[in-house]
Amino acid sequence: MRLIVGLGNPGGKYRDTPHNAGFLVCDRFAERHHMAGESSKFQGRFRRGRVRQQDIAVLKPETYMNLSGQAVSEAVRYLPLTAEDIVLVFDDIDLPQGCIRIRPHGGSGGHLGVASVIEQLGSGDFPRVRVGVGRPDERGAANHVLGRIRTGEKQRFLETVDLAVEALDTILENGIDEAMNRYNGLLPLGHEQEEGKA
C-alpha cells in the first residue's frame, strides 16, 4: 500500500490559497482515478482505492498545517505503513509557479507542515512532491501562502497542480527515480512559450 498525503488547512477560508496546494493535488488525483468518496478518518479526510493495480490511500490532514504529523502518524500506525510508503505533497515558495520538484527524502526546508510530519514519524525518509507557488511579494510569506490566489495566477497554479498529479502517477507506475528524471529538469510551465518568443 502507498499513502499519498497532501498538506493544507481545512475550511473554506483556506480553500483557494497556495498553502493548500497539497489538498488540491490529492483531490485532482482522486478524481482522475475515480476513487471512492472521502470519509473522516485519521484526523483528516481519507479515501482509498485501486490505482495502477496498487492499493492507494489518500489523506488530507485536518489538524491545520503545523500539526499535520499527528494525522500522518496515526494513519501510519493503523494501516500500517513505513515512512517510505508515504508520498508527501506540499507547497514550496522557493519554487516558481509552474515548477515541481521530487525528492526521495530530506529535511523540512523550513516548511512547518513537513517538519511536523518528520517529527511525528521520527524520519524524513519519505518521497515528497514540492509544488511551486512562487516567492512572496510585498505581502510577505504568510500573506502570500494564506491569501487567495490572484486571478492572473490561477491558471498557472492549476496547471502546476496537474503536473504534480502526473508526477504522482509516474512515481506509482515507474518509481521515484524515473519521476525525478522526468520532472525535475523541466522549465517552469509557460517558459517554453516565452523562450520561443525570444
Image (spheres, rainbow, N blue to C red):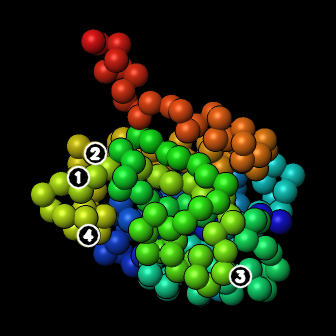
Asked whether residue 168 is in view, the answer is yes
Residue 92 found in image quarter: bottom left
Above or below, comparing residue 113 to residue 105 in the picture: below
Comparing 120 with 14, the one in front is 120
Q: CA distance from mark 2 to mark 4?
A: 17 Å
Counting from the top left corner in percent of width and height, residue 136 is at 24, 56
Q: Which residue is mark 4?
A: 142
Q: Which residue is mark 2?
A: 153
Instruction: Please state which amino acid type lies under the numbered disc 1.
Output: Arg
Label 4, secondary structure: give it.
helix
Asked whether residue 26 is in view, the answer is no
Is 8 left or right of 194, judged from the image as shown? right
Counting from the top left corner in percent of width and height, residue 90 is at 49, 62
Q: Residue at x 58, y 77 (%)?
A: 117
Task: Identify the disc placed on residue 158.
Answer: none
Nearer the camera: disc 3 or disc 1: 3
Above or below, comparing residue 43 to residue 130 in the picture: below
Q: Residue at x 66, y 80 (%)?
A: 121
Is 57 left or right of 98, judged from the image as shown? right
Q: Which residue is mark 1?
A: 150
Q: Residues within 10 Å of mark 4 (few under 14, many from 20)?
A: few
Q: CA distance from mark 3 to mark 1?
A: 34 Å
Q: Which residue is mark 3?
A: 75
Nearer the camera: disc 3 or disc 2: 3
Q: CA distance from mark 3 to mark 2?
A: 34 Å
Q: CA distance from mark 4 to mark 1?
A: 15 Å
Q: Residue at x 36, y 60 (%)?
A: 18
Comparing 117 with 150, the one in front is 117
